[in-house]
Image (spheres, rainbow, N blue to C red):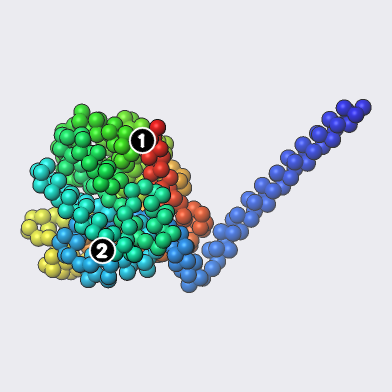
Amino acid sequence: MKILNGRIRSKREHILRITFLIITSILLIGVLPLCKIKLKDKSDDELLKTAFKICENNLILDSHIDWPDKHLQFPEDISMRTTKGDFDLVRAKIGGLNAALSVAYIKSDLDVNESRVLVDSIIELINNYTIIYPDKFAQAKNPNDIKENFKNNLLSLPLCLENGLPVGNDISYLKNLKDRGVVYITLNHDKTNQISDSNFDENRKWNGLSPFGLEVIKEMNRLGIMIDISHSTDSTVFQSLRYSEAPIIASHSSCCHFTPGLERNLSDTLIKAIANKNGVIMVNLCSMFLDSTCMKNCGYLLNWYHSNGIDMDSEEGIEFALKYGETHQIKSNSEQVVNHIEHIIKIAGIDYVGIGSDYDGMGPSQPIDLPDVSSYPTIVFELLKRGYSENDIKKILSGNFLRVWNQIIEIAGS
């Protein structure tokens, strides 16, 4: 009888637990939309204040800023408000930026020796800021460094290499880059190189990765250097996913969904594949990668610069772009940026997207309301308007990238 009564009580308790879970689930289903509605019902002023507070209190990482290249063209002290470019400490503080992955951009027409000299110069340039202003800037070689610098109110300047050209055919050079703090390498840029094919180059010499490129992938895995496939052909991306033991990143790429035919962006298939390998896609803010009309008109501008031998950052180049922009759309906006973020979330999930602005690397193509590194609150404001929680926004601002980076380091150490 005791056994029977015990079974009856146990059954009743089981039924009560299930009933409680069902009621709780129903309540949560009802409450969560109400939370979103409540958030959306706030005024724009209230949401903007919340956006600034989120940016002030949480770590923001931008995975691709070309300020060193801009600095080489127009030397200015980035610890102060600069007159040119999209990046400096003053505007970074306004925007809440805590980690600016600082890019050593290597032009594809250099030879290996020239490119290595340039790498040395840029690394020295970046590191000098951490030496001259130790109370403002700091090096960062891993996510723990980033988090520690954030606690100490220091702007992290991790080193990155855009274009694997300087590696040449010497695999040991990768160890040299790792030891000096380079955290990711973009395999190529606008031309096919000794590692892989570029999506800007009609010459698809390797049909993806070269034989040497396969060695590079394995060595980067071993060293814990992140593999960046922005600028790579689709074949290069698929092969990188196949042969890499670690996740890969797209440090500054957006969605082909909004720019059909632009291989520089990522197809839905590639977005899913990168996410399935636990990688991350960092959305590029360049207007020509966000919107088809901007893509067409900015393409015209780039062809005009090239055919006339004019630098887009020169006075003549800027003046022409401004004049052309009066009658042709060349600038996107924060809504379209968040459209790309939402598309990746729809395709892959909230854990696989971040921001890789390409500031100082996009010429006159900054979105109209996102002119520089002071603009991250504007993106957060748009996310809040669409009902995203602070926890989800934290993932987009840095959490997703740091998670992937940590996993890459763990795989290298295993």
Q: Where is residue 375 in the image (x, y as percent from the top left)?
A: 36, 65
Q: Residue at x 37, y 39 (%)?
A: 408
Side of 170 relative to 237 (left or right): left
Residue 236 circle label: none
Circle 1: residue type: Ala
Question: Of 225 and 11, which appears nearest the observer?
Answer: 225
Q: Which of marks 2 and 1 is in front?
A: 2
Q: In this view, does 4 lie above or below 131?
A: above
Instruction: Find numbered disc 2 in the image and state the secondary structure of the residue it sits on.
Output: helix
Circle 2: residue type: Ile
Mark 1 crowd level (few <14, some 14–19, many ≥20, 10 Å Cα): some
Q: Is residue 289 visible?
A: no
Q: State the quadrant of the C terminus.
A: top left
Side of 159 relative to 33 (left or right): left
Q: Can residue 76 be seen in this view?
A: yes
User: Looking at the image, is mark 2 or mark 1 earlier in the sequence?
Assistant: 2
Q: State the quadrant of the N terminus.
A: top right
Residue 412 circle label: 1
Q: Position of residue 302 (x, y in %)?
A: 16, 56
Instruction: Find numbered disc 1 in the image and state the secondary structure of the residue it sits on.
Output: helix
Q: Position of residue 98 (x, y in %)?
A: 37, 59
Q: Which residue is drawn at 86% across and 31% down?
A: 6
Residue 132 circle label: 2
Mark 2 crowd level (few <14, some 14–19, many ≥20, 10 Å Cα): few
Side of 371 relative to 30 (left or right): left
- Locate residue 187: give its quadrant: top left
